Amino acid sequence: MKKLLRPLILSLFLCSVAAPQIAKLTDVGGGVGLGVFKGNTSEEFGYSAQGSFDFKLWFSEKYYFRSAAFYTRKFSILLPEDRYGRNYPYLQGFSLKFMGEQLITTHISVEGGGGLAVINDRSFPETDVWSFGSGISFHTIFYFFDKTVETTGYSVHLGVEWNVGFFNTIPEMNTVQAQLHYSF
């Protein structure tokens, strides 16, 4: 037991020391939006929600990665009506995007990026299909702090998100979103 305990403690210590040097959490955020999506159906109008976090790796201070979880559902589920026998399709998924940002003024910048996405198509109750694909996003960022002086604070991101799957039912979502982020 002692032979196993020492290497375990040593590896946990090394991982806790090395992890901050490899990746640094820089930003968390969430947002809502409106857009269109389709899976195994024609295009539907829907609302969307997204939660994300940004992190930088050791090799770059300028570029960063954004990992996000998103959800899009048919808008009519929010309307009061008889729900018996109705279908309210939705898409959900995850993405990992490589992002870049360009400062325009001390309080405004633009960002964009692209990467991989995994999308779950739930067009019908019997449809539960995962698809690998890609996603891109473009945002205008409004900072509530002077970006040239400070690095922490709140910001509002206004922009578009597009995710598409390449296999199975070829799910796709296009949304216009407003997001609130906090930078560490």
Image (cartoon, rainbow, N blue to C red):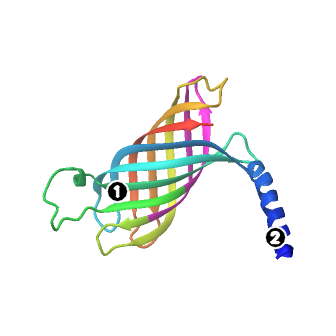
Q: Is residue 144 above or below residue 4?
A: above
Asked whether residue 68 is drawn in magenta, I would say no
> Gap between marks 1 and 2, in whole Å?
51 Å
Q: Is residue 141 visible?
A: no
Amino acid marked by disc 2: Leu
Amino acid marked by disc 1: Phe
Q: Is residue 184 visible?
A: yes
Q: Going 29% across and 62% down the picture, which residue do you hit?
A: 89
Asked whether residue 106 is drawn in magenta, I would say yes
Q: Going 22% across and 53% down the picture, which residue do you hit?
A: 76
Identify the residue at the far left of this view: 82
Residue 43 x %, y %: 29, 58
Q: Is residue 111 above or below residue 87?
A: above
Point out the stretch of residues depicted in magenta: 96-119
Q: Which mark identifies residue 136?
A: none
CB within 8 Å, label 1 to label 2? no
Q: Going 45% across and 70% down the picture, which residue do you hit?
A: 130
Q: Going 39% across and 44% down the picture, which residue do you hit?
A: 32
| Label 2 secondary element | helix
- Left or right, 129 with respect to 104, comes to left
**Mark in front: 1 vs 2:** 2
| Label 1 secondary element | strand
Which residue was labeled with disc 2?
5
Q: Tag 2 or tag 1, which sits nearer the N-term? A: 2
Which residue was labeled with disc 1?
37
Placement of the N terminus among the 4 image quadrants = bottom right
Q: Nearer the viewer, residue 142 or 4?
A: 4
